[in-house]
Amino acid sequence: MIEYRSPEISKKAKAVIDRDRKIMFGAHTRTSEIPLVVDHAQGAKVTDIDGRTYLDFGAGFAVVGTGHCHPDVITAIEQQIRKLIHISGSDFYYTPQIELAEKLIEITPGDYDKRVYFGSSGAEAVEASLKISRCFTRRPRMISFLGAFHGRTFAGMTMSGSKKVQRAHFSGLIPEVYHVPYPYCYRCAFAQTYPECIRKEYKGIPLIYCMSYLTDIIFERLIAPDDVGLIMAEPIQGEGGYIVPPKEFLPLLRKVCDEHGIIFILDEIQSGLGRTGKWFACDHVGIAPDITLTAKAIASGLPMSATIGKAALMDPDVDPRAWVPGSHGSTFGGNPVIASAAIATLKIIEQQLIKNADEVGGFLKQELIAMMDRHRIIGEVRGLGLMLGIELVQKKEDKTFFPPEVTREGKNIKEVITGECFKRGLILYGAGISSLRMSPPLMVTRDDAEAAIKILDEVITNVENQMK
């Protein structure tokens, strides 16, 4: 049994929290373990209303890639806000939206003609991609993955396979969506071991065992492939636990989609825009989808998403099967102020932060692996760049999960560790069933990484000592 001490809350902070609880909706995922009332933030540091500063290794769920309040982003916002704040880009023309779309077309994977749709959130990009695919293919069925997270709208939660609380009591969801196991090799759904699980090929591509569920079960017993309009996947699962699949996974999906005329969609909403040390996570294996979804880090904290896809799928002037004028749109998508912030954001990422994510992320992963060797409750460290996951286990030898409640107050192990880190000045999030995620701003320094490791090491040591 682990003893857990609730962090002290000042009267000033408690007054704000109490005001919030009286008026805000009740589905927030805030916890009492991290009662953070933010006053301001800069770079990788967040300061609360009591003047206490925290090292931010969550970045607002991987949103503030350039760091909090980057001066170049602020300048871009200030200059644009004096010229034009809003006029709907679905009906009129202005250069920030065009310039941003041109840059996204340049950096997204795929050597083909592309088109861009702007929305206000990642879930909106998911919705758009489903409509694009359904309209173009006229096929009713869709495939996603267990552990996936694609948002909380009806389409988003239908495609998601992360947590039952996100879907419970909202039926019926969108019909004809099939979920297949994601290659979560540390906890293989079929008790296989990679790469020994590769025993045959699919059209010349090595077939990892879990994907045979798609090719040999779903496509043979449940649905015909030519009824499937799209396959949607995260190249690295985010909320599912920061899970990096084997290198064969994306090439196999690309092959399956090509073979059957299925639209291949990659949700790079969390993994894209430099976080893994490349523009997009799929760049690590050289695979281009038909549609790329991005959001989160695109505008350094302002709400925006982009759906970037093959021109034939999105422009009826290129292919008459594509959606037509009036069939989709967004009042705020491509807003000139947010587009200007995004242009500045991409410039900063390109010039400074992709390399930094690779270098500091490599150092951080190396330190975490060394920490894993010292601690019995760390079962695996995984990730690319500054998208790193830490799997927590009760017993390494059989990868035993911690019970859902392991403390005297009924807190789970992720809450214990993130709460104790918070009390020591480190903001950290959980992910998946039993993992921690590290997704700091891409401008984080090696000194920041060392400070975070020191805090986490101390917390895990204390947790393990209390478990004896």
Image (cartoon, helix red, strand yellow):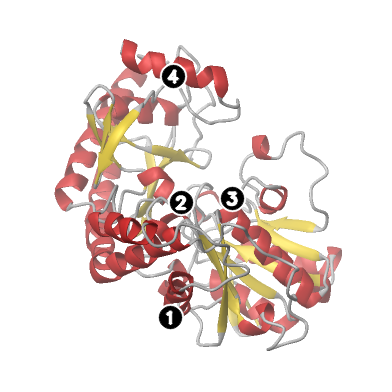
Q: Quadrant of the C terminus?
A: top left
Check disc 1 and report the residue beneath it.
Answer: 106
Relative to the observer, which residue lies in front, 443 or 128? 128
Tell me: residue 402, above or below residue 372.
above
Residue 242: which disc? 2
Residue 452: which disc? none
Per the model, the C-alpha gap separating discs 2 and 4 is 30 Å
Q: Which amino acid type corresponds to the residue marked 2 in the rendered image?
A: Tyr
Camera sees residue 4:
no
Q: Which amino acid type corresponds to the residue marked 3 in the rendered image?
A: Phe
Check disc 4 and report the residue beneath it.
Answer: 17
Judged left or right of residue 83, residue 91 is right
Q: Nearer the viewer, mark 2 or mark 4?
A: 4
Q: Which amino acid type corresponds to the residue marked 4 in the rendered image?
A: Ile
Residue at x 51% of width, y 55% of height: 237
Q: Position of residue 444 (x, y in %)?
A: 23, 52
